[in-house]
Amino acid sequence: MNTIKKYIMMLLLPLLLAGCNNYFDINTDPNNPSAMSVSKLLPYAQISVAYSVAPGARGSAYSGIGDLLNVYIHQVTIREEADKYGATGGNWTIGTSWRNSYTDALVNLEDIIRQGTENGDSQYAGIAKVLKVYLYSVLVDVYAQVPYSEAIDNFYPHFDEGDQIYQSLFALLDEAIANLNDTTAPNELTPGADDLIYGGDMKKWTKAAYTLKLKLLNQVRLVQNVGTDVQSVLSQDLISTFSESLMFKFNSTRTPDNRNPAYGDTYEATQKTKYMSPWFYEILMGYNPNIFSGNKDPRLPYYFYNQVKPTEAVSNRVEYRDGGFISIYFGSDGPDRDNSQDRAMTVFGIYPAGGLYDDGGGTKVNGNSSTGAAPFRMITYADRLFIEAELIQAGIISGDVQSRLRSAIEASFTQVDEVVTLVGNTQTVPKVATATATTTYIDNVMAEFNAADNNKKMEIIITQKWISEFGNGFEAYNDYRRTGYPILFDPNNPQMAPGGYATPKSDNGGDPGRDTGVSPAVKVSCSRGYPMSLPWPNDELEPNTNAPAQKSNLPEYKVFWNK
C-alpha cells in the first residue's frame, strides 16, 4: 500500500507543482492578456488612424489633425486659436492627433507587422504597412520632421528628416504590396470582418497601395524626377471606383459612439465651434469673380445645412448672412463675431459628416437629426483622377488633361451620392451626379478650363479637387503648399476683406435675406503669415531630450517637398 501511495504521489507531483506555479503567478491576469492577436489589433489600429487624421470634436479624444487644417484651407472658420493661424504647440488638436498617431495607431500597426512577419500572416503585415505608410506620410507632410527610426522603441526618439522618411516609405510600400500578394506564406490567419476598411479583400488593398504610391510620387514631384516611377505605377491596377477608395466607414451606433466625429461636434454639441467658411461658400455659389463666376455648384445643399429658412429672423445679430447661410469671417474682430448662433449657424451637411441634406426646411439640428454614418475619405477614386490631371498639366506624364479633369469632377459628384447611400438618411435626398444642373455646371467648368492659360488651368484642377475633398483638410493643405492653389482667403488683402470682391453679406437689422450691405464694424486682419508646417506638440518636446527646439517661424519652416 505504501508503495502504491508513493507511486501515485510521484505521478501527481508535477501536476501539483505546475498548479502551484500557476497559483503563485499573481501578475498574470487571464482576462487582460499582455499580447493580442493581429485580428484583435487590426480594427483598433484602423480606427486610430482615422481618428488621427479626420476632423473631430474639439476637446475630445477624437480630435484629428484635419480639425485644424480645415480652418487653414478655409473650408471651416472657428473662433479658437487656429483663427488667424494662431495654433501653437499647446493646441489641443495637435497634441491629441499626435498621441493618437503614435500611442495608438503606430504602436499597434508595428505590432501587427511584427506578429504577421513572425507567424507568416503576410496579409496582416501588408495591410499594416500600407496604413503605416499613409499615417507617416501625413505626419511628415504636416510637421516636416518627426520621430520615425526610433519612434516605437525609444522613449526619447530623435526626429528624422522628412525626405529620408519618404524614401523608407516608398520601400515599405513595395514590401506591403509583396506581402498582400504572397501566395507562399502560410497565412493561417487571414483578415475578414476584422478588416474594417476592405473586409479582407487583398485586391482592393493592393489597388490602395499603388494609388497611395501615386499620391506620394506626386507630392515629391518638385524635388525629384518621378516620371518613370509614375508611369510604372499607372501600369498597375489602381482604385477605379468609389467603393474601392481607401476610407474608414463610420456607422450610426451611438453606444459606443461609432459615428463620424465631425457629426458629434456639429449636431450633438450644444456649443458648436465650427462655422462654414464664407470664402468656400461664395466660391460654391459662384460669387467669386475670379473662378467659377456665376456657376453655382449643385453640391451646396449636400455640403451645408442651414438651420434657418432664407427669410427667417434670428435672435442675435450675425456677422455674415446670405439667405439661410450664417457664419463668421476668418480673422474678424467685429462686434457680432462672438454672438451665440448655435441654433442659427450653418453646419456640415450630409456630406461630409453624415448630417442633413438641406431641403430648405430650416430645422434646428441635434444628435438625432441624422445617422452620422459618413466615411472618412483618405484616398478616393476622384482623388486619383485629380492627381493624374495635375501630373498631365505639370508635364510629368502625357495624356488628355481635359478628359481626365472632367472624369475627376464627375467622380467627385458620384462620390457625394455614394456617401449619401452610406449615411442611410431617412430624408428623401435626390441624386446629384445625374442632375441636369450638374451637367451644366461641369460643362461651364470645362469651358472656363479650355479658355484658361496654363497657370489658370492648374488653379482650376486644384480648386475642383479642394471642393471635392471637403472634410479632408489634410489633402488640401498639401495641395496648397505644393501648387499655390486654391487661392485662399487673405484677410490682409483689401480686395478679399469685407468690401472687396468677395462681397460680404450681413444681417444689419434689415433684409433677413441676401443683404449686400456691409457692416462698417466688420474688420478682418492677420499679422501671421501662412504656416508652411505645424508646430510640434509641446508634450512631445518638453520631456524628450533628443527633440529639436520648437519652430520659431512657421511661414518659413517648409516640408522638404515644398519648393
Image (cartoon, rainbow, N blue to C red):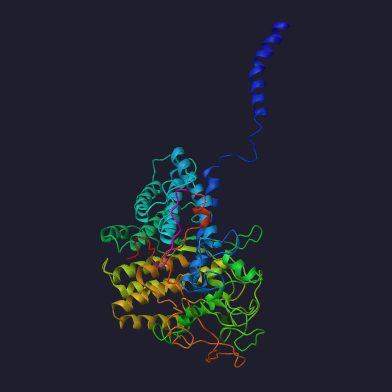
Question: Quarter-wise, where is residue 509 in the image?
Answer: bottom right
In this picture, residue 30 sits left or right of residue 231: right
Instruction: Determine if the magenta segment contains residue 552.
Output: yes
Expressed as whole percent of the image width and height from the top left, the position of residue 233 reads 32, 58
Position of 34 relative to 397 (above/below): above
Measuring 47% from the left and 48% from the top, which residue is drawn there? Answer: 545
How many numbered marks have been drawn onto this rendered protein structure? Answer: 0
Q: Nearer the viewer, residue 96 or 331?
A: 331
- Viewer-proximal residue among 333 and 6: 333
Seen as rendered, the residue at the extreme right is 1
Residue 552, quarter of picture? bottom left
Could you say where residue 13 lies in the image, as x and y percent from the top left? 66, 17
Residue drawn at point x = 54 percent, y = 47 percent: 41
* Residue 499 visible, this orientation: yes
Residue 194 pos. (x, y %): 54, 50
Residue at x-position 53% and y-position 54%: 539
Up-down: is 104 above or below 274?
A: above
| Residue 46 in view (yes/no) | no
Measured along the vertical axis of the image, is residue 18 above or below residue 420?
above
Horizontally, is 254 left or right of 207 in the view?
right
Q: Tell me the quarter of the picture where residue 166 sits.
A: bottom left
Quadrant housing the C terminus: bottom left
Q: Which quarter shows the N terminus?
A: top right
Range covered by the magenta-colored residues:
545-555
Question: Main SS type for the magenta part?
Answer: loop
| Towards the viewer: 253 or 461 | 461
Q: Is residue 170 above or below residue 113?
A: below
**Within the magenta stretch, is there residue 8?**
no
> Residue 257: x and y, percent?
63, 60
